[in-house]
Image (cartoon, rainbow, N blue to C red):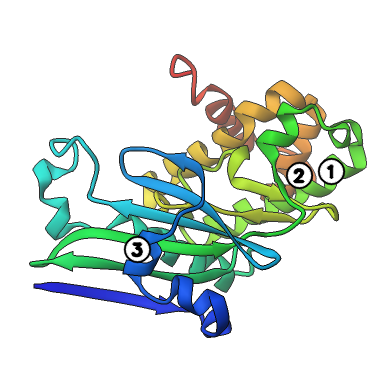
């Protein structure tokens, strides 16, 4: 038996977007520019009129069933596509700028996940921070611009962690910046809620993901300013210094 749960943002439920993104079968028949792909998903960019949309389609649960609970995740686990759209909804609820969800949903057969998708509208005039770094954008030499962007990223990270949520892939490529130095958080299929020591570890990982590129581009004083903005303190405490050592050393021997 096939069951489909599909939802469309009412703001996009008319005209061409309604026809293109109105159901899961239509979304899986779309063609467009291939942006990224892996064993779990494919991302297409589709143009409708003067706007562009990102269509992320998930099929199955990956190639390695042993690592995915010996194949049982198809029945027992929450699909990554669901986590991704729920996390984007949570970001918006917390006041974190993110992409607008246009449509999302999933399909099951005999209770097992078979496929799912989410569609987001492109945020115009943005570039991810990793690309900004890669092209050696001149804005990175502007200390005031860096301070504005860094402060907003610190606000985003603090908001996530205050909700006991960790992104788990909080890298520069998942942070978009526009011409006014506004920052948007995207692409979070592996984020989740934690408590206690596990939350502390995940927070360290999030901050280390940000710092591993920052140390290649920014000065020590700029990295320190980010941390102070994150903890909202004028100076470091002994506990802060211990945490910073963990952040700096998190990826030692891993990358």
* Disc ID at residue 82: 3
Q: Secondary structure at mark 1?
A: helix
| 200 to 74, vertically: above or below | above
On the question of residue 214 being in view, the answer is: yes
Q: Mark 1 and mark 2 in contact (Cβ < 8 Å)?
A: yes
Say left or right for 144 vs 231.
Answer: right
The residue that mark 1 highlights is 147
Q: Alpha-carbon distance for marks 2 and 3?
A: 30 Å
- Marks 1 and 3, the one that precedes in the sequence: 3
Residue in the picture at 44% in, 19% down? 254
On the question of residue 195 being in view, the answer is: no
| 75 to 208, vertically: above or below | below
Number of numbered labels in the structure image: 3
The residue that mark 2 highlights is 150
Residue in the picture at 76% in, 28% down? 135
Q: Mark 3 and mark 2 in contact (Cβ < 8 Å)?
A: no
Mark nearer the viewer, 2 or 3: 3
Q: Secondary structure at mark 2?
A: helix
Q: Alpha-carbon distance for marks 1 and 3?
A: 34 Å
Q: Position of residue 8 (x, y in %)?
A: 45, 78
- Marks 2 and 3, the one that precedes in the sequence: 3
- Count neighbours of disc 2 (C-alpha within 10 A) and say few if under 14, some if 14 to 19, many if 20 or more: many
Q: Secondary structure at mark 3?
A: helix
Split into 4 quadrants, where in the image is the N terminus? bottom left
Q: Alpha-carbon distance for marks 2 and 1?
A: 5 Å
């Amino acid at each position: 038996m096939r069951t489909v749960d599909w939802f469309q943002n009412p703001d996009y439920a008319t005209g061409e977007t309604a026809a293109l993104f109105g159901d899961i079968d239509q979304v899986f028949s779309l063609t467009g520019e291939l942006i990224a792909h892996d064993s779990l998903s494919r991302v297409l960019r589709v143009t409708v009129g003067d706007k562009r949309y990102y269509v992320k389609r998930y099929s199955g649960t990956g190639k390695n069933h042993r690592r995915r609970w010996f194949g049982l995740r198809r029945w027992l686990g929450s699909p990554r596509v669901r986590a991704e759209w729920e996390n984007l909804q949570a970001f918006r609820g917390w006041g974190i700028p993110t992409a607008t969800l246009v449509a999302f949903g999933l399909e099951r057969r005999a209770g097992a996940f078979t496929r799912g998708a989410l569609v987001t509208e492109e945020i115009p005039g943005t570039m991810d921070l990793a690309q900004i770094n890669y092209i050696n954008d001149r804005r990175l030499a502007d200390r005031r611009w860096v301070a504005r962007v860094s402060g907003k990223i610190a606000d985003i990270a603090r908001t996530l962690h205050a909700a006991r949520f960790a992104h788990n892939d909080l890298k520069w490529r998942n942070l978009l910046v526009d011409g006014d130095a506004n920052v948007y958080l995207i692409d979070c299929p592996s984020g989740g809620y934690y408590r206690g020591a596990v939350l502390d570890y995940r927070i360290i990982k999030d901050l280390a993901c940000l710092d591993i590129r920052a140390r290649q581009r920014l000065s020590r004083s700029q990295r320190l300013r980010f941390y102070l903005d994150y903890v909202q303190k004028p100076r470091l405490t002994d506990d802060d210094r211990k945490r910073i050592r963990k952040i700096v050393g998190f990826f030692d021997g891993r990358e």
